[in-house]
Amino acid sequence: MKKLLLSLLTLLLILSLPVVAFAYDYSDGARDALLVDSADLLSDEDEDYINKRLEEISDSYGCEIAILTVKSSGISEIQDYAEDYYKENGYGYGSSGSGILMVIDMAKKESAIYANDAAADIFDDDDLENLKQSYLSYLTDKEYKEALTEFCESCESILADNSSPSDGILSEIFSIKNIITAVIIGLAVGFIYTAYLKSRLKSVKAQSSASDYMVAGSLQMTQQRDIFMYSNVKKTPKPKNNFSSGKGSSRSSGGSRSTKGSF
Amino acid sequence: MSSLHEYICPNCDGKIQFNASSQKLKCPFCDTEFEPDAFSSVDEAISEEAVKSDSFDWNRDAADEFSQNEADGLISYLCNTCSGEIVTDTTTAATSCPYCGNPVIMQKMLSGLLKPNCIIPFKLDKKQAIEAYNRHITGKKLLPSVFKDKNHIDEIKGIYVPFWIYDASVSGSAQYKATTVRRWSDSNYNYTKTDHYQVFRSGNMQFAKIPADGSQKMPDDLMESIEPFNFSEAVDFSTAYLSGYFADKYDISAEDRIVRANERIRKSTTDTLMSTVSGYSTVVPTASNVSMTDGKSLYALYPVWLLNTTYNNEKYTFAMNGQTGKFVGNLPVDKGKLKKYFAISSLIGTLAGFAATVLFNLFT
């Protein structure tokens, strides 16, 4: 019993090592770049620079910051487009997809910012408005690199005000939920182990029967009757399954926020 | 279900009527149908039952007293602290009471002492008893250290405990309600069919040499915990067997101890009858009766190694079966050690639980 308990505990501890050993990386590796410059506003060099900045900020704060530029998309409503594009392409960190997407439509000269889940809590309406104003004038002046750089810096500044860089990684591991669960498990292990140790101290128990003193082979059955009396049949309807089993992306509902502007 | 013409429904307690169209007995309240001969079979089974009420009939044989010659070879010691009284032969000296450890004083008078019919001599000596005690306390992490003190362990004493030994022929009858359950389903419904049965069992069995200790000083659960004793190794009593050991005098009569023997006989009988009911999903006993005949009792001395330890003003008694070596005794908990082990195991559990939780969140 003791060996089994120790082996189980050792196994659990060993399995947990890879979790904390490597630096926590928020990127899911599924997307190649956080900047999608379909409108070709930037040179390759500038594109790399902005991509790097976006990755740095996203990894540090656990909030995915992405930019999409389009030449002409036939977008009717840019805020809806931004939201749909965000969700269809699986942006965002964590199971609920925390992040921000900025869309620039060069045809209609419009820009929108969409914030999803935890990002919608960090970036309130005023923040989104300030963010938008920070780069719109650069877009009007056709200074595209400056516009996107300003967007990145403003995002980082707002994120920094709301949390420190390290919070993103450690807060995920040391969340209240994880700590409380661990303490409950620890107390349960403590109670079970000490109850086992205490049970080993008890060996006195009264005998309830005299089965040890029944003469072997002395049992003679004089009556064995099993009489069938009646039957009951219960019939319950089967539940009907109304749910479709098709695939679909599911993001847990969180808040979301968006804004748009023209340039 | 007692009258030939009026039956009560076992499903809802309504009065059953004969349904002419189905030719079956039917309950008008719950619509349950019964086979026509079901109730008459039950009536028949009840009348055939071997035992209809409990009865325990014991023969109480008068036991002999010691002859004067035999009594001269015995000494009695009295403990003034706990009123314990032990007997040994004249060659053995007693200095301390096996029950409380305090000094005993020798008494000269020994009369009216009932002579045992038989005795199971000690098969295991003091050295083996001490080894068994050491095995008993090994690995008990929460045990206070005083229990491991070698000087104290040496005080273990061999004592013959008075037992009343009972033989009986027993008849038992029992009734049960039993069900079998079958489940199946089609595209629209799930079905559950339950068949209800009335089950009757009666049988005879023999019990031999059920022991019940005759000393108030000996806790009953402690003596029952070191069972079983093998009566086939019992011999006719002789005072020679007492040499080097002590014998307790009985202070509970055979009549008073019969109650305990009856309880155990009853439980064994009903358990045995229940074990013959098989093949059902549920079995619920509804009635049982046990009758005993040819009850006999003997007065015997059984060997027990005894050690008393006092800890925190509480007495802890350990007993070893002097014939089979079975060792029992409840040990106390050292609170300091309990807290220490709780803290260590909780800490390890918390760390392991934390790692498991993080891992779980990572992969979901």
Image: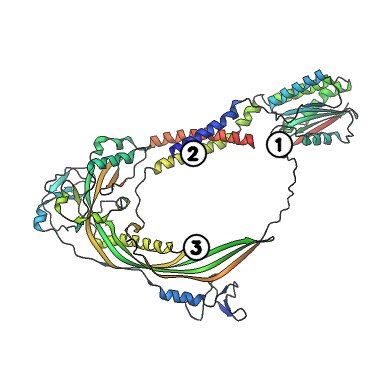
In front: mark 3 or mark 2?
A: 3
Tell me, yes or no, whether the two marked residues, 1 and 3, touch with CB atoms within 8 Å: no
Q: Is residue B250 visible?
A: no
Dot 3 corresponds to which residue? B279
Dot 2 corresponds to which residue? A189
Mark 3 vs mark 2: same chain?
no
Judging depth in this view, the residue of A246 and A156 nearest the camera is A246
User: Residue B347's mark?
Assistant: none
Q: Which residue is drawn at 61% across and 31% down?
A: A173
Residue B328 pos. (x, y %): 32, 46
Q: Is residue A190 left or right of residue B25?
A: left
Dot 1 corresponds to which residue? A96
Under mark 3, the amino acid is Gly
Q: How far apart are marks 1 and 3 (CA)?
A: 54 Å
Subunit under mark 2: A
Q: Distance between the residues labelled 3 and 2?
A: 40 Å
Tell me, yes or no, whether the two marked residues, 3 and 2, touch with CB atoms within 8 Å: no
Q: Is residue B248 left or right of residue A100?
A: left
**Among numbered discs 1 and 2, the one appearing first in the sequence:** 1
Q: Distance between the residues labelled 1 and 2?
A: 33 Å
**Which residue is situated farthest in the top direction here?**
A45
Under mark 1, the amino acid is Ser
Determine whether the residue tagged by mark 3 lies in a helix, strand or loop. Answer: loop
